[in-house]
């Protein structure tokens, strides 16, 4: 079964998102949708869902509406009748027979078995979704998609919050699946390993490419360079033609000044020259008008924080023997950590290991059961909230920025434009922005916070690739300190930071540990070289 969708123009709430949409996907293809934030990728997934309701499953990106449900109940709702029966069984044991007849327990066992492949235990399945980590929520959402067994699976940013183990697991599941899978993603490595085709989504339309991200990028870069070359050639030709017209006109003007009015021969020659000049100008203008190569688009956005004051104290943040238990589950046990002055931190760890909890303790919204946390007084901390809980959904981006202290309208518009908010977007209700646009707005708010320390929790989630690169530039230029929590290997490879990892309820300095073996080897070698020297500094000999 193939999946075809065409719409011209493609609209949402009466607003044109894409001039023309043409999607043609063959059975079994694994297709990535690529495009800028806000162009309409997620909306396009919903359109495909509505066009093929019976054979399509759409993975929910936002799990907020299901926070009070257990993960098991959320998965059971794939079969609403079973979910309803299980609820009724609590007060009516006679419903158990109906549940058995519909193979409810068999389906529960299938859920448990498949959940193990996504590193979700029965204990995890019994938890409310709001009590699961971001990575665990994503895994539950993906698991539900595969359990649906629909012909067409639609995944919206499926790699968000996933640790490397779970990312590899997702890649394996997609590659072995015979279902048709369409996903929105900006994760370059993931696209490279899963996509058979790529759809480029722009304001103008849709275009299909065969192959992975690297192949797509190569083709697009070649096309861009060809356009650059053609445009530069066109500009040179236009300038040359304009110079020719100017020169012919100058010849005519000069001849007109030097030709006698009373000399009929000279007047005839002047008339012919004027006619030739007119024809030449017409020809040249026609040639200019024939040149219609558009100027290539270049993303030259720059974003720099204001220069910050550095602290003189050696240590900015320090954990000493910190222990904490949440919902009767021990997360940290005698954990130690230190962030020094002029030092960036990269924090990694498996899903559910306590990375978000670590940030909450630094922000002092949660206190440990044991141990001490020291934070340098007057340290201004600003954080990127991956749940966008700090945004006012009934306000516009411009309203939120203008509500900040000492911000002018001009300054607000300039920074918003840097993050690709056009005149329409800056006045739009935040509730109608895409997840990527909401995240971009958070970075605008971070700019005006004038922080000494930036805490970025999965900062590249939902961002298009161009904005990811902008964020990287921002991190590189920021003169304060940055603490980054991320599973994004591309981001990890691009930043200079001390690497801390959560392991077995402890915090380990991986940078220090990685240096230790080399230091030990060097010491052993040194001892070997000087083992024959006595206490007086003399080499011992056989004599």
Image: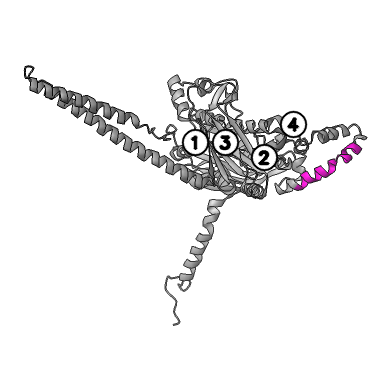
Q: Nearer the viewer, mark 2 or mark 1?
A: 2
Secondary element at tag 4: loop
Left or right of 120 in this view: 40: left
Cα gap from disc 2 to disc 1, whole angstroms: 27 Å
Cα gap from disc 4 to disc 1, whole angstroms: 34 Å
Q: Which residue is mark 1?
A: 467
- The answer to whether mark 4 and mark 1 are in CB contact below 8 A is no
Of 414 and 521, which appears nearest the observer?
A: 414
Position of residue 234 measured from the top left corner of the image (x, y, whole percent): 32, 35
10 Å neighbourhood of mark 3: few (<14), some, or many (≥20)? Answer: many
Q: Residue pushed farthest right?
A: 94
Magenta-drawn stretch contains 106: yes
Secondary element at tag 3: loop
Cα gap from disc 3 to disc 4, whole angstroms: 24 Å
Left or right of 358 in this view: 397: left
Q: Which residue is mark 4?
A: 68
Report the residue at 30% width, 28% height from top. Answer: 286
Secondary element at tag 2: strand
Q: Which residue is mark 2?
A: 153
Position of residue 240 measured from the top left corner of the image (x, y, whole percent): 25, 34
User: Which corner quadrant of the image does residue 182 belong to?
Assistant: top right
Magenta-drawn stretch contains 285: no
Q: Earlier in the sequence, mark 3 or mark 1?
A: 3
**Residue 2 appearing in the image:** yes
């Amino acid at each position: 079964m193939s999946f075809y969708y065409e719409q011209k123009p493609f609209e949402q709430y009466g607003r044109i998102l894409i001039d023309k949409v043409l999607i043609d996907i063959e059975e079994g293809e694994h297709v990535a949708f690529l495009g800028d934030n806000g162009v309409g990728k997620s909306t396009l997934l919903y359109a495909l869902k509505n066009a093929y309701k019976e054979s399509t499953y759409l993975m929910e990106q936002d799990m907020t509406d299901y926070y009070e449900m257990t993960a098991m109940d959320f998965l059971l709702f794939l079969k609403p009748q079973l979910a309803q029966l299980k609820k009724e069984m609590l007060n009516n044991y006679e419903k158990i027979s109906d549940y058995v007849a519909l193979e409810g327990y068999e389906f529960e066992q299938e859920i448990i078995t498949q959940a193990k492949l996504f590193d979700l235990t029965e204990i995890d399945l019994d938890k409310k979704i709001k009590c699961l980590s971001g990575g665990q929520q994503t895994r539950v959402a993906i698991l539900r998609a595969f359990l649906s067994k629909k012909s067409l699976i639609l995944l919206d940013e499926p790699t968000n919050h996933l640790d490397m183990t779970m990312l590899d697991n997702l890649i394996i599941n997609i590659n072995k699946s015979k279902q048709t899978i369409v996903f929105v993603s900006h994760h370059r490595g993931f696209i490279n390993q899963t996509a058979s085709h790529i759809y480029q989504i722009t304001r103008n339309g849709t275009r299909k490419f065969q192959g992975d991200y690297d192949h797509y990028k190569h083709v697009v870069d070649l096309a861009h360079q060809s356009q650059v070359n053609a445009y530069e050639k066109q500009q040179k030709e236009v300038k040359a033609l304009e110079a020719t017209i100017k020169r012919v006109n100058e010849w005519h003007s000069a001849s007109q000044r030097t030709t006698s009015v009373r000399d009929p021969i000279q007047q005839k020659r002047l008339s012919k020259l004027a006619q030739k000049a007119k024809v030449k100008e017409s020809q040249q203008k026609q040639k200019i008008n024939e040149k219609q190569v558009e100027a290539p688009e270049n993303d030259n956005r720059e974003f720099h924080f204001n220069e910050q004051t550095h602290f003189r104290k050696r240590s900015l943040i320090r954990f000493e023997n910190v222990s904490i238990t949440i919902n009767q589950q021990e997360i940290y046990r005698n954990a130690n950590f230190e962030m020094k002055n002029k030092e960036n931190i990269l924090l990694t760890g498996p899903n559910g290991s306590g990375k978000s909890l670590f940030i909450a303790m630094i922000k002092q919204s949660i206190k440990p059961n044991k141990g001490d946390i020291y934070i340098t007084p007057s340290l201004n901390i600003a954080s990127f909230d991956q749940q966008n809980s700090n945004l006012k959904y009934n306000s516009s981006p411009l309203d939120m920025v203008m509500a900040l202290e000492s911000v002018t309208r001009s300054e607000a518009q300039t920074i918003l434009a840097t993050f690709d908010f056009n005149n329409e977007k800056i006045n739009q209700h935040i509730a109608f922005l895409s997840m990527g646009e909401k995240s971009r707005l958070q970075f605008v708010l971070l700019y005006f916070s004038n922080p000494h320390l930036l805490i970025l929790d999965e900062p590249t989630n939902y961002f298009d690739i161009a904005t990811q690169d902008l964020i990287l530039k921002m991190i590189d230029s920021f003169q304060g300190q940055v603490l980054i929590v991320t599973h994004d290997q591309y981001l990890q490879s691009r930043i200079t930071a001390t690497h801390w990892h959560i392991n077995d309820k402890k915090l380990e300095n991986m940078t220090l540990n990685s240096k230790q073996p080399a230091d030990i080897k060097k010491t052993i070698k040194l001892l070997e070289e000087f083992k024959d020297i006595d206490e007086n500094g003399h080499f011992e000999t056989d004599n």
